[in-house]
Structure formats: structure tokens, C-alpha cells
Amino acid sequence: MATLFTRIIDGEIPGRFVWSDDVCVAFATIAPISDGHVLVVPRAEVDRFTAAPDELLAHLMRVAKVIGAAQETAFGAPRAALLVAGFEVPHLHLHVLPAWGEAHLSFRDARPDTPGERLDEAMETLRDALRAAGHADHVPARLGSPLL
């Protein structure tokens, strides 16, 4: 059975995509800790990061770095943070988010009641920053599509 993230990648469930390549995608989480919080998810269904091939992990980290730099610019954050937990969905994913301090890097601070319009606005801000940084070839043409 396909994971929730595979169903989002395949377009069965709506997603707010900011990145797409042959190996992975990045899309908004529905419960952001901060505006601009995204998940970097491999297209392949890998259960956890310790089970992933090294090449896949290296690619995900490169994409997370690019997205993190764009988040710092787009949201004026002093840092981008990277969290890996994987308990909510059994499909490897990296949480990449603008961060202003360690005290605000807890899933207890997640905001599942964030309005869709606010999520859309944050993702468009991030998509613009990725394009401006020279990554337009990986920013899907439409926010709701994983296709380029």
C-alpha cells in the first residue's frame, strides 16, 4: 500500500510543492512549526533514514541545504533547521524550516490549524526565493503539482 507521501507525490492527495526532481520533492507540511516549513521527501518509499542508501541521503541533504538557504532569505531567518524524526509517516522525510532559535524547534510548536491561504502564501514566498537563487528548473510550474 502506498504511503501518504507517495499519494501526495502521485497527486492523489493535494500538496503544496516547492521542489521537484527525479529523486525527491519538497512540499509544505500541514502543521508548520514556522512559516515556510517544508518536507523533503524521496520519491522512493524508504521507511526511515537509517535504511536509505547513502547516495539518496546525500541528495536529500543537498536539496535541504538549497531550500534552507532560500528560507533564510525569504523569511529573514538567521538559520534554517533540519529535523528528522519519521514517526508520523513511515516514509523518509526531512523537515526543513526557517528558525530563530532552538526553543522553537519542537513538534509541540506545530500549528495544524494554519489556514490554507497562509500556507499558500508562505510556499509562494519560498518558491520565489528558490527561483531567484537560480533553481527555477526545480520549482514546479504550479504550487499544487509535483510536475515541472
Image (cartoon, helix red, strand yellow):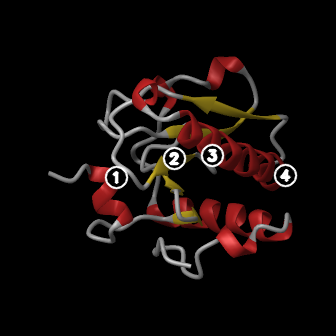
Looking at the picture, does residue 70 appear above or below residue 141? above
Compute the Cα span from label 4 to label 3.
22 Å
Label 3 is placed on what type of residue?
His
Would you name the residue on which mark 3 appears?
59
Which-is-in-front pick, marks 2 and 4? 2
Tags 1 and 2 touching, CB below 8 Å: yes
Earlier in the chain: of badge 4 and badge 1, it is 1
Which-is-in-front pick, marks 4 and 1? 1
Would you name the residue on which mark 1 appears?
5
Earlier in the chain: of badge 3 and badge 1, it is 1
In which quadrant of the rendered view does residue 92 lie? top left
Q: Residue at x 73, y 44 (%)?
A: 68
Tags 4 and 3 touching, CB below 8 Å: no
Would you name the residue on which mark 2 appears?
39
Tags 3 and 2 touching, CB below 8 Å: no
Q: Residue at x 25, y 49 (%)?
A: 3
- Give percent across and percent down for residue 11: 33, 71
Earlier in the chain: of badge 2 and badge 4, it is 2
- Give percent across and percent down for residue 133: 85, 63
